[in-house]
Amino acid sequence: MTNEPNDKVERTIARFDRITAQLDQRGGAVNDAARRERQRLNRGFMRTLVRIGVAIGVISIATIIVGLILPIGMFGFLAAVGLAVGVVALLAVSGGREIAAPNVSTDLPNDEMVQRFDSYIFRARRALPASAQAEVDLLSAQLTPLKQTLERVDALDPNAQDARRLMSTHLPGLIDRYVHVPQAYRDERDGEGVSVDERLVEALAAGRAALGDISEKLARQDLAAFETQGRFIQSRYKDEAID
């Protein structure tokens, strides 16, 4: 008597467990990315409110000072109100764009660079196929430890420069180019027999692996520095008498 039915059931259960584990991992990464995006939006909203408050205060004080010197009348008052409304609208619009911009200046700190990229891929995720979304989720999950490592590294460090190019130019450029490919052409295969969707997934995986390698290099540098400091302290003070 064979155990083939039992083996099939066990394989089915094992496969189900693997699938649900993968879905849980993806769901956790997506939820974490959404939470970080909400935090960034809240910080940006508060900064915008502060700028709006300062702008309205400056306009109000300027209007009062001018009114004490020269009578401004109803038209002057309406002009001040219109100026305040225009400034508020301008600050509100510019504050909303600031968070989403993937392009960054050369003097932007490393940790802010990672946050900009994290925000960009979170917003771009919905435009990608499911297979690419899985890669984006894995990429998003490794950004928090990467940020913790990069924020202690100078922006001119070669490893930091490689990471910044990937996050500010190469990966956003890849996603933007994919989005511009018409839907009807995404199933076509190139000379290597790879479709547009497959090429996107492969490139995202390569970028994710590169960022992982950079993060590991920097972490190992910290580990080596710690070991060197520990050996120095041991050799310097281990046998020294302490009064």
Image (cartoon, rainbow, N blue to C red):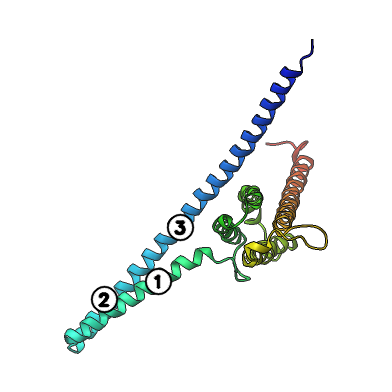
The spot of residue 40 in percent (x, y) is 48, 56
Q: What element carries label 3?
A: helix
Q: How crowded is mark 1: few (under 14 residues within 10 Å), some or many (20 or more)?
A: some
136 left or right of 52 in image: right
> On the image, which quarter does residue 231 sit in?
top right
Query: Marks 2 and 3, Cα distance to the nearest angstrom?
Result: 28 Å
Q: Name the residue under label 2.
A: 60
* Three-letter amino acid code at the position of disc 1: Leu
In the image, residue 117 sits, relative to residue 83, either above or below, namely above
Q: Name the residue under label 3.
A: 41
Quadrant where the image shows the N terminus: top right
- Contact between marks 2 and 3 (CB within 8 A): the answer is no
Q: What element carries label 1?
A: helix
- Which sits in the foreground, 116 or 227? 116
Q: Mark 1 points at which residue?
A: 91
Disc ID at residue 142: none
Q: How crowded is mark 2: few (under 14 residues within 10 Å), some or many (20 or more)?
A: some
